[in-house]
Image (cartoon, rainbow, N blue to C red):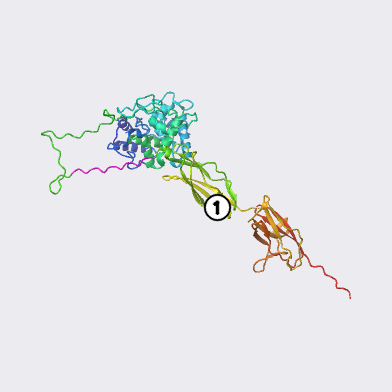
Amino acid sequence: MAAHIRRRLRKGATTTAVAAAAVAALAASQAPAAPLTEGSTGGDQQTAGGESGGPEDDAATGNSPYYTDLPPLVTPDRPGSSSNLPAATGSAEAGIPASVLAAYKQAERTVAGTDPACRLPWQLLAAIGKVESGQARGGKVDANGTTPSPILGPALNGEGFALIKDTDGGAYDGDAVHDRAVGPMQFIPSTWATWGQDANGDGRKDPNNIYDAALAAGRYLCAGGRDLAVAADLDRAVLSYNQSTEYLRTVRSWFAYYQRGTHEVPDGSGVLPTSPSTPTPSPTPGGTTSPTPSPSPSKPGGTKPSPGPSKPGGGSTPTPKPTPTPPPKPTPPPADTLGSLENAGTGPLTATAGGTFDERVSVRARNALGAPMAQLPVTFTVTGTTGTLFDGGKKKVTVLSKADGTATAPALKAGEKSGDFTVTATAGTTRPRTLTYAASVTARQADGIVRTDTKALVAAPGEKFADAVTLKATYKGAAAAGVAVTATLVADADKPAENDKGPHFKDADGKPLRTLALTTDAEGLLRLPDLFADENPGTYQLVLTTEGGAKVVIELTVEAAEETAPPEA
């Protein structure tokens, strides 16, 4: 069965039945990949042959030939295993050369950092790398990941392939007449000019370097807001690489195979593919494929085609016109597509009630190529119950990003209520990106509190203390307004448990209170309510503690008045 499938694919079979048989055979022994979506076989627009419509150079590879070898019908040894398996584990086809594997994984991590919503799996890059170049010809790369000689596809001269005239002056492909697909991921020069990356940090965007090419492929597959965990988006992404139903099914087969497990092999020792796809037959001199001729009319004596069923009245029923497929929505250029929204250095967001936050929320927008994105509207929203607002009294503001991609919200003004809240930054419409920042408002504080006079506080048992107690709270030498202060009457300040006898305040019903929560006024002053003595003489203490830890202890004395001897007669 496997040999039969391979023979059909080597002949460039294009029927859905054969492709479905291949997938079914693979599925018999492999974990299923995400299913092909209905109607996905032709990309964004279909032509009669099942291939994707649109210009040939819309594909990353220019629809160059690819390798049609299928994975073996025996999966790697351990279902769900990873690329950390030893080289001796699994089939030879499951081995990926070390540098090539490292490049795929690095690309996955990089894209996850700039476009996490894409959910790019490195196994998809491995599947495309397998069918495009046999994993850089079995991993023949130098220490920097560059192939010793360019991997070039055939000239795209319209003779069996697409017709794409030279776009790079031969700089990448050595051909100044026609373009050729270049490198391990087989980008045509015009596509590389837009999507090329420098992933290995050598200052060059080289399509012959596996690190650069893998990252470029990852960003290309994620274009247009695709989520590659969604089957339909994954199909569209693969078809944008090469607009062929069979290409999609071949990549899908390797993707499913690599998801079941891979292992690392030394560079240069990967399994080389053997079966290239068949070029498109019978091109016309203009470079396009000749349409299939219509059947000729019958010769005299031959069988005439039967007319269609007659309408009432004798006329033949005309063949209904096919409903035209609506054109796909154009995908925005990568430079105009929002790729990510990231923190642009915002520090901890904390302020005292009523104060201004020292930090301002700042984000950086990047496009699908990872470059800063300017003039992008970014909306910042405050959510919470602290009363915090942006400068100007607004909970929501919109700011345009600058040339470096940064957008910075106005300063935050803390509300009067302490607690936590959030600031959310949102950008983009098709697939919005958001960042959420945690923030908090702390209560007003004082680092000092003192009495405004030093007069002794004395009262007779059962009487009111005649002198009022007034204090002032300060913070860093300035009056501390609105600071919470706790007043507690105790027997011993070193053991500050609330006393059950001695001086006290009174509640609205005249009952004794020995703990009160108070707040300083606008000048930082605090005037205590009246204090009363009970029938227990002695020395007591009033402890006042501020939010912020400042404390003052005031001594209270309850003693009977001295008796005065009556004058002698």
Q: Nearer the viewer, residue 61 or 464?
A: 464
Q: Please name the predominant secondary structure of the magenta segment in the image.
A: loop
Farthest residue, direction right: 569
In the image: residue 534, left or right of residue 25: right
Q: x, y percentage for residue 176?
A: 37, 24
Q: x, y percentage for residue 133?
A: 39, 29
**Residue 329: in magenta span:** yes
Farthest residue, direction front: 392
The quadrant of the image that shows the C terminus is bottom right
Q: Which residues are magenta?
A: 318-331
User: Which residue does the numbered mark 1 point to in the structure image?
Assistant: 388
Give the number of callouts.
Answer: 1
Asked whether the viewer can see residue 415, the reply is yes
Which quadrant of the figure has residue 243? top left
Amino acid type, callout 1:
Thr
**Against 565, is 307 above or below?**
above
Q: Nearer the viewer, residue 226 or 255?
A: 226
**Residue 413: in magenta span:** no
**Against 227, is 132 above or below?**
above
The quadrant of the image that shows the N terminus is top left
Label 1 residue SS: loop
**Against 78, is 454 above or below?**
below
Q: Nearer the viewer, residue 16 or 265?
A: 16
In the image: residue 289, left or right of residue 346: left
Farthest residue, direction left: 301
Q: Residue at x 32, y 27 (%)?
A: 157
Q: x, y percentage for residue 342?
A: 50, 41
Which quadrant of the figure has residue 14? top left
